[in-house]
Amino acid sequence: MAWVNKNMAADLLHATRGVKSVWMQPASTIQAMGIGWLWPGYLACDKFHILAGLAGTGKTTLAAAVAATITRGGRWPDDTLAPTGNVVFWTGEDGVEDTLVPRLLASGADMSCVHILRGTYEATGKARPFSFETDIPQLSTALGRIGKVRLIIIDPIVQAVSGDANKNADVRRGLAPLLELAEAHGAAILGITHVNKGSAKKEPIDRVNGSLAFAAVARIVLMTARCALQLDDAGNAISRAVLVRAKSNISADDGGYEYGIQPTSVGSSVYPIATTALVWGEHIKGSAKEILALATEPTDFSGALGDAVAFLQDVLAIGPMTVPEIEAQAKDAGISSSALKRAKKELRIKSEKATGQGQFSPYLWRLPTAADGDGLGWGDSASANFSTFMPSPASMPGRGLFQPATPSMPFAGTTPVPHRDEFALFGMPVETDDGIGRGQMRSVEPLEPVEPLEPLEPLEPVEPLEPVEPVEPLEPLEPLEPCYAEVIVAKGVLDMLLGECRAMWARGIHADEASDDRIRRINQRAIDILLSEFSDDEITVYTRVLDQTNWWV
């Protein structure tokens, strides 16, 4: 130990004297520490994570469910308890008001604990978009002010890299400030991204979009995939997906969970907002590659067709949509009409005429169901029955969001999404420590009847107020004498006339050469001006000024 202290002291001495040196510390002096977990095996404190998957697999909805679990200290699908804390969410793809907030509400998040990173204020007060390259110090300050930030979600993570997201050096340089931020605040960072199209046969971590550095820097890489549709006992199509661990440097890297993305709505019955919510399914064993292979994802289309397929799966996931709406959104997304039609054919999209508007009713597109009689399609309809698969999610009111996530309208009559500790999945009761299954109701003792309240004594009548005596009218004010300000006005008119005289003098006409008649005309002009602009009292003031001012000299 004396050798250790001697060498470390020497390094510090060199540093204080301005001499460059390296810092080495014997491992024997370093205290071992365990991993702090938000979700054991899946989300670790002060670590960087990746969540990757094809479009339409519900990555953002899954992230909203994860955020909701943390904000209310709920249970994960393995029944472990999440620590309660705040969540920061930055999105560069989805709309905050119409997409992200409804999904958080449908997931049952405590909205006062979700903070949406909207942008940065300059010192001048001007707002601008948040920059991961320059604004991390300000973000760190804000996280310290909020306190207990457990999770930071970045969607998509590629926008955190200011350089080329396909170059290893640029990605590592862009992610370095985020790693320092996570360590400084003990928060997990979850970066959402896509997988490369046409990469189904590759190793899972090689499918992550962009440079391999994204998966290399991440301590845990999670991946989603859509399963082939199945039937429930009632013959309805069930849309399932899987979440697997494709890589983990700090825990086991196998296994995963089934989940479903179910259409739902939040808000009041008068103004419902269509959205989606996640419901957890069974635990799955096996490696990521094995699970993804068994999931039998839909055909991995590539190019323009792949983009169109992913687009239709995404927009129709919450239910039918009119053809004009689909075509307008496809145009905005850069998808051609021909690619859209091909994708419709590949997905076996059903086209049906809406009812209620007669010949003006528009056509609707929807994903196929088992009831169509031509085999299962690529998704489920809004009427699909999930009751035998998982509980139906609902929503809860938002209470507040870097911007508090309070919606702009009231949400009434909503309840939190049920979780595994509140019901039995698939009709199977789950034993708890108190011996009561989570699918069973506790017996409740009846309440004692409440005694009726005694009627209140009637209030005594209030005596009427005495009438108020009328106020005597005020005497009229005497007119004021012309004030000095009026003299100034009159003097201004004289100054104007004096200017004319000076102009005559400048032309060689002197005062002694000017006739009395000309002076009278100039004076009469001043009087005419006063008559048209001023009162009799003001003209009297003018004449007094004229007497007191030898203005023609």
Image (cartoon, rainbow, N blue to C red):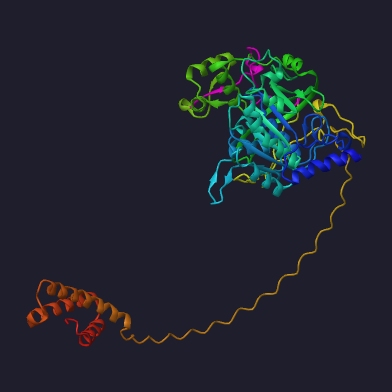
Main SS, magenta region, reads loop
Q: Is residue 363 above or below residue 92?
A: above
Quadrant (top left/top right/bottom left/bottom right) for the C terminus: bottom left
Q: What residue is shown at x 13% (from left), y 72% (from top)?
A: 506
Quadrant (top left/top right/bottom left/bottom right) for the N terminus: top right
Q: Is residue 453 above or below residue 479?
A: above
Residue 38 on image: x %, y %: 79, 36
Image-quadrant location for residue 241? top right
Q: Is residue 70 above or below residue 373?
A: below
State the residue in front, 294 or 494: 494
What residue range appears in magenta?
Answer: 361-389
Residue 531 on image: x %, y %: 20, 77
| Image mark count | 0
Residue 40 on image: x %, y %: 82, 31
State the residue in front, 503 or 420: 503
**Residue 405 visible to the viewer:** no
Magenta stretch contains residue 160: no
Q: What residue is shown at x 76% (from left), y 66% (from top)?
A: 456
Q: Is residue 327 above or below residue 174?
A: above
Image-quadrant location for residue 271? top right
Q: Is 303 left or right of 531, judged from the image as shown?
A: right
**Residue 414 visible to the viewer:** yes
Image-quadrant location for residue 67? top right
State the residue in front, 298 or 114: 114
